[in-house]
Amino acid sequence: MHPLLNPDLGLWVWTLLAFVIVLFILKKYAWGPIIKSLNERERSIAESIETAERVKAEMAQLQSENETLLAKAREERAEMLREAKATKDKIINEAKEQAKVEANKIMAELQASIDTRKVAAINELKTQIGALVVEMSEKVLKRELSDKASHENYIREMAEASLN
């Protein structure tokens, strides 16, 4: 058989001694830096996780603030639209009222003009009628009528002539 497959006691002792020496050298020179680097790595990972959670919380807070700002902006936009609509309605209503006032003023002026012309026409008509009455009276008085029948006949003729 092969000597490595069937080890004797000396091989065991030398192997154990080599293992202990390597273990001691590793413990003295390698494990400290390895453990230190593992601890630093663990601390770095923990800090990264903590930073990531803090950033995640800040992002959530910023998102919440953004949503609040968006909601506020929407409310302000809606309020501005309501104010604009109210202003538009107010301007339209004022314009309608002003148009009504102007129309009423024009109608009053027209009515006054019509009334003035009507009064002037009535006065002119009265003047013309008065002139006709005076004229007819003059003609009646100028003409010497002999009897009452011819006098009445003449008055009827004058009245018909003036009406036509």
Image (cartoon, helix red, strand yellow):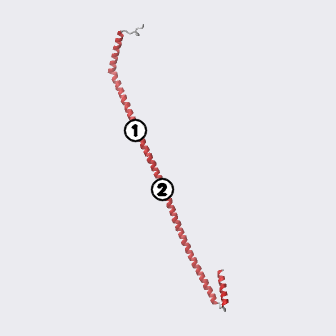
- According to the image, label 2 marks what residue? 86
- Looking at the rendered structure, which numbered label has been put on residue 57? 1
In the drawing, does residue 160 fall left or right of residue 32? right
- Badge 2 or badge 1: first in the primary sequence: 1
Q: Position of residue 137 (x, y in %)?
A: 62, 87
Which image quarter is the C terminus in?
bottom right
The residue lying furthest to the bottom in this view is 146
The crowding category of the residue bearing disc 1, from other C-alpha atoms within 10 Å (few below 14, some 14 to 19, many at least 20), is few
Residue type beneath disc 1 = Ala
Q: Which of 51 and 67 is in front in this view?
A: 67
Q: Which mark is residue 30?
A: none
Q: How far apart are marks 2 and 1 (CA)?
A: 43 Å
Vertical placement of 153 versus 59: above or below? below
Which residue: 56% across, 77% down? 120
In the picture, the quarter occupied by the N terminus is: top left
Hey, which quadrant is residue 37 in on the image? top left
* Residue at x 55% of width, y 71% of height: 111
- Three-letter amino acid code of the residue under disc 2: Ala
In the image, 1: left or right of 97? left
Alpha-carbon neighbours of circle 2 within 10 Å: few (<14), some, or many (≥20)? Answer: few
Q: Residue furthest top?
A: 1
Secondary-structure class at tag 1: helix
Residue 64 lies, with reference to residue 111, above or below; the image says above
